[in-house]
Image: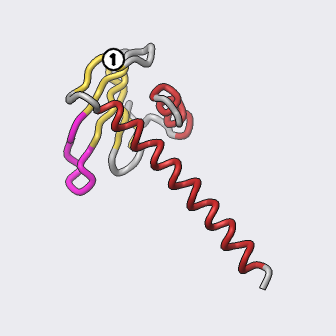
Amino acid sequence: MKQLTEIINSIQEAHAFIHDIIEYDSRYDLARFGRELLVIEKDEKTQSTNSFFYLSSEGKVVHEHAEGDADRFVEYYNNKEQLKLKMEYELEMWSKKYAKG
């Protein structure tokens, strides 16, 4: 399981900031805000802001909209990565099974 700083680094390596924003997925955006990074949780239907938290340049949470916002983001990311790995494995097994026949 990745920790918060590892997750942020992975996202920043895989995506480019456009006008200081990374639109990570339908639920989370990352935005540069001065020397801090703002992680915004959005409502997936309306895209309005549900919550947010700030990270300092040292990777420490300096402000959360509600307690547990950063932990929820870490859990969401790790669950998403586990699901992705499971789907890739199942696709590989399916491909091997049906490629033989």
Q: Which amino acid type is shown beneath numbered disc 1?
A: Gly
Instruction: State left or right for residue 99 relative to residue 40.
Output: right
**Helix, strand or loop at disc 1?**
loop
Which residue ends up furthest to the right in the rendered image? 100
Residue at image point 45% right, 13% down: 58
Instruction: Look at the image and say whether residue 45 sits in the magenta stretch.
Output: yes
Instruction: State left or right for residue 66 relative to residue 23.
Output: left
Say if 44 sits above or below 5 in the image: below
Residue 57 pos. (x, y %): 42, 15
Residue 79 pos. (x, y %): 45, 47
Task: Between residue 98 and residue 39, name the one nearer to us.
Answer: 98
Instruction: State left or right for residue 22 relative to residue 45.
Output: right
Q: Main SS type for the magenta part?
A: loop
Residue at image point 44% right, 34% down: 17
Residue beneath disc 1: 34
Q: Quadrant location of the C terminus?
A: bottom right
Task: Between residue 88 and residue 40, name the one nearer to us.
Answer: 88
Residue at image point 52% right, 50% down: 82
Residue 55 pos. (x, y %): 36, 21
Task: Between residue 101 and residue 38, name the one nearer to us.
Answer: 101
Quarter of the image for residue 99 reads bottom right
Residue at image point 26% right, 20% down: 63
Q: How many marks?
A: 1
Q: Residues within 10 Å of mark 1 (few under 14, many from 20)?
A: few
Instruction: Look at the image and say whether residue 29 sits in the magenta stretch.
Output: no
Which residue ends up furthest to the bottom in the rendered image? 101
Q: Which residues are magenta?
A: 42-51
